[in-house]
Image: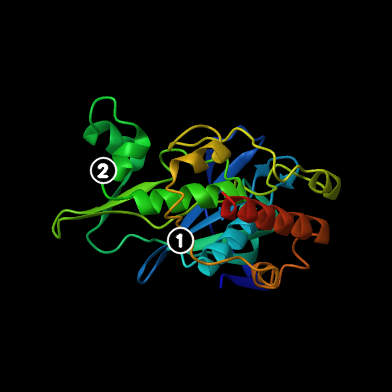
Amino acid sequence: MAKIIKEKQDLTYLKWSHIRSSSGTAGTFLKATSSLDNGKKYYKISNFDPVKGVIGHECINEIIVDRLLTLFNIEHLEYELINADIEIEGNLYNTYLCASKDFKKSGESKIALDDYYRTNSNPGESHYNFCKRMGWQKYIDTMLVIDYIILNRDRHGANIEILRNARAHTLKIAPLFDHGVSLLYSCTSDKEALSFNIMQDRQCNNFIGSFSCCENLQLIDKNNKPLSYKLKKDDKKILFDGMDDILSKAFLDKIWEMIYERFLFYENL
């Protein structure tokens, strides 16, 4: 399961770059990298405001979804949640951030699915049918279900990547990644979390299908549903292990209610 490092780490040496949120949220998402002996390590923090500091909890969402995907036995990018001191534009902040390793193997290059689609699709071919023709239907169906369960608002065409190895002549979709803009990411207080409508269909930035994660469930084959694991109420302990002092009980309870109820909706299709 995704690891949480609560002992404060000094990561003030990291250099952060500004990545504007594509989901329309206020603030900025910041990313950084460091070099390791066996490759790079990537870091990102939750939504950041220059005046208020870290105002979001997207990094915690990443860990929750990481654990959920592990339960479902779905290949995905693995994250660590790290308590760290960081420096941004001369100011010090303490926050929980995410860290992950590069999922590319030696000799592989990556390209965003939207770019790959533009150069390889047939005239008039939908994004979904293109992926189906390429042999990626099971992957895409699984992704659509997960994005519905967590209400992922940001599955644009660059949040799905294709890995190519020219020498080995291989082509495959990268493990699922980038799930921070999901769950209750738009809530900034317990009051907002408690009043959040967990079943409401909200507009999402989807490359596959429509802007509705609920409508996109209609694309999958109902006779061959992609999830084999049946979520249980006891799984709540697994998803939120070690988070009691990181996110409030109101948030954790509401996030679990959201995941479980939306899973049951999918199961009853």
Q: Nearer the viewer, residue 232 or 96?
A: 232
Mark 2 or mark 1, which is nearer the start of the sequence? 1
153 lies left or right of 92: left
227 lies left or right of 58: left
Residue 45 at least partly seen: yes
Q: Position of residue 253 (x, y in %)?
A: 78, 59
Label annotation for residue 133:
2
Q: Position of residue 95 (x, y in %)?
A: 69, 58
**Vertical side of 225 occupied by 148: above or below:** above
Element type where label 2 sits in the image: helix
**Vertical side of 89 occupied by 235: above or below:** below
Q: Look at 70% across and 72% down and name the residue there.
A: 242
What residue is disc 1 on? 77
Q: How many marks?
A: 2
What type is the residue that disc 1 sits on? Leu
What type is the residue that disc 2 sits on? Arg
Element type where label 1 sits in the image: loop
For disc 2, the neighbor class at 10 Å (few under 14, some 14 to 19, many from 20) is few
- Color scheme of the displayed model: rainbow
